[in-house]
């Protein structure tokens, strides 16, 4: 059942906060942090202190590196193969894989999934070439009016820019398509221009792949703590910078003395006379502000580590943060954090997403594009053909030295072959590159290229 334009507008209004939070996360992820930190400081500090804080602003942005660290399931080998198909199906899949940079686009979807717990991916055609695009999470709403499966979207609403100074929405269901505006009206003119005045979805299903981390809601609840922590850390560091600035200047004070003609300059001499009629002795002193930097830095470190712990991520161990290793220390925490469990969960979501993506392309978009003569490819996929994606095995974070040691011991014990050990040590290499490396090592050592017996492991794999 298609939504009415009024209903679409009410759904958008209900999700205003959700879209706004996603917009902030995307802004910060893409590097726009200063504006949000400035607003935080303005809300928290007096006007005079706020002006000083602006000159000492420290925009350390941990979000891009945090997301980048989580997002690597597409940066290792992903293999795709046709199941229950024939040779023609395999050739057609190869054609699509040649035209579409699947890993790059799905990696972008994986980034947004880690950022906002959901991703929306759209196959499309441009100049006869198929491709994928990822819709930013502040530009779409997933909605369901299915009482049996309320976690599965029955409609996708896309914010599609402005027309006649009004926000435009594209709404898709399995059977219908509608263009409406923020006034709750159907945009008939735009629907005619889109060559779909009757609002029929000829594809036969919603032309998107939706990846959702929530098992219970059609749209996930955002973790407000992520947004809060990426703002809080630079605010706390800016506080330290402001404190350091004021700590550099002592406050002079005087008691029962005249301050006429006092000059603040090197080698200046101040002369005071005692008041013979008073029993009070004039005196001068200074107040030197002091800040416990170490305690504040430890607090920052603890809060960052505890936050990572709530995400199922073990933070890297760096000892104690110090003033001279603050930026590098925070960077090292993220560099060395163990994302093993998080990556394992992502694989299960994106295996399902890949299956859905190729079902959409094979059995819906491909026939639709051929019917509209938008692509040059001919033929159709077999009705039962499907594609599965296999991701590289996700391993706990280890240093290369530890991997070398483990593989050497397995090889020495006879639990693996030399070639398999080389594959573990160099997962980014192809089979041909592994063979070339083994041959190169053997030639340098002047040995015959053959499987080396376990007893000679110390000769073949150095300690």
Image (cartoon, rainbow, N blue to C red):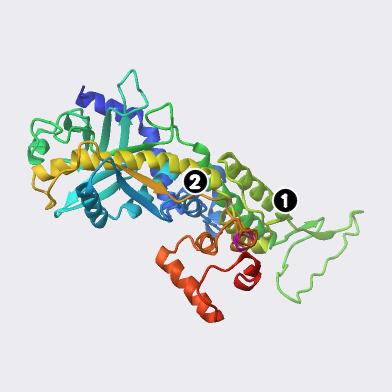
Question: Is the C-beta separation of discs 2 and 1 under 8 Å?
Answer: no
Residue 287, percent from left and from top: 76, 57
Spatial CA span between label 2 and label 1: 34 Å
In the figure, is residue 388 to the left or right of 395? left
**Residue at position x 73%, y 67% from top?**
262
Whether residue 139 is situated above or below residue 150 in the rendered picture: below
In the figure, is residue 197 to the left or right of 57? left
Whether residue 287 is situated above or below residue 435 in the rendered picture: above
In the figure, is residue 406 to the left or right of 201? right
For the question of whether residue 291 can be seen, the reply is no
Residue 248, percent from left and from top: 69, 63
* Residue where numbered disc 1 is placed: 295
Residue 394, percent from left and from top: 50, 49
**Residue at position x 51%, y 42% from top?**
226
Name the quadrant of the N terminus.
top left
Closer-to-camera residue (184/138): 138
Q: Earlier in the sequence, mark 2 or mark 1?
A: 1
Secondary structure state at the residue bearing disc 1: helix
Name the quadrant of the C terminus.
bottom right
**Residue at position x 32%, y 48% from top?**
81
* Residue where numbered disc 2 is placed: 343
What is the chief secondary structure element of the magenta stretch?
helix
Is disc 2 surrounded by few (<14), some (14 to 19) or many (20+) residues within 10 Å?
A: some
* Magenta-colored span: 403-407
Secondary structure state at the residue bearing disc 2: helix
Does 363 lie within the magenta span? no
Q: Residue furthest top?
A: 147
In the figure, is residue 276 to the left or right of 285? right
Is disc 1 surrounded by few (<14), some (14 to 19) or many (20+) residues within 10 Å?
A: few
């Amino acid at each position: 059942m298609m939504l009415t334009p009024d209903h679409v507008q009410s759904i958008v209004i209900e999700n205003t906060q959700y879209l706004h939070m996603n917009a902030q996360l995307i802004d910060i992820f893409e590097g726009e942090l200063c504006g949000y930190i400035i607003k935080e400081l303005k809300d928290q500090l007096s006007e005079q202190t706020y002006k000083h804080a602006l000159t000492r602003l420290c925009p350390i942005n941990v979000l891009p590196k945090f997301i980048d660290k989580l997002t690597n399931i597409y940066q290792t080998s992903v293999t795709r193969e046709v199941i229950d198909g024939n040779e023609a199906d395999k050739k057609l899949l190869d054609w699509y894989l040649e035209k579409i940079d699947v890993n790059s686009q799905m990696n972008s979807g994986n980034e947004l999934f880690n950022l906002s717990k959901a991703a929306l991916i759209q196959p499309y055609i441009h100049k006869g070439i198929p491709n994928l695009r990822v819709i930013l999470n502040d530009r779409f709403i997933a909605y369901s009016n299915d009482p049996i499966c309320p976690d599965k979207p029955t409609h996708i609403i896309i914010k599609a820019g402005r027309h006649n100074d009004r926000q435009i929405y594209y709404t898709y269901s399995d059977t219908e398509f509608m263009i409406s505006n923020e006034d709750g009206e159907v945009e008939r003119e735009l629907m005619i221009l889109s060559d779909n005045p009757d609002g029929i979805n000829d594809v036969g299903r919603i032309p998107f792949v939706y990846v959702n981390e929530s098992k219970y809601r059609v749209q996930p609840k955002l973790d407000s703590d992520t947004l809060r922590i990426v703002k809080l850390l630079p605010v706390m560091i800016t506080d330290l910078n402001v404190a350091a600035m004021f700590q550099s200047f002592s406050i002079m004070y005087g008691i029962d003395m005249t301050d006429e003609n006092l000059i603040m300059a090197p080698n200046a001499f101040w002369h005071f006379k005692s008041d013979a009629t008073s029993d009070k002795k004039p005196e001068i002193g200074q107040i030197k502000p002091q800040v416990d930097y170490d305690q504040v830095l430890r607090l920052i470190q603890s809060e960052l580590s505890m936050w990572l712990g709530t995400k199922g991520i073990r933070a890297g161990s760096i000892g104690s943060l110090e003033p001279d290793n603050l930026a590098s220390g925070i960077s090292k925490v993220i560099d060395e954090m163990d994302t093993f469990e998080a990556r394992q969960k992502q694989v299960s979501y994106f295996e399902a997403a890949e299956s859905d993506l190729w079902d959409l392309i094979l059995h819906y978009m491909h026939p639709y594009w051929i019917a509209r003569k938008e692509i040059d490819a001919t033929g159709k996929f077999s009705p039962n053909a499907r594609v599965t994606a296999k991701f590289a095995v996700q391993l706990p974070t280890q240093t290369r030295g530890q991997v070398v040691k483990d593989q050497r011991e397995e090889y020495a014990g006879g639990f693996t072959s030399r070639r398999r050990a080389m594959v573990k040590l160099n997962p980014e290499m192809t089979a041909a590159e592994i063979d070339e490396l083994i041959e190169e090592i053997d030639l340098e050592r002047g040995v015959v290229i053959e499987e080396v017996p376990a007893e000679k492991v110390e000769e073949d794999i150095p300690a």
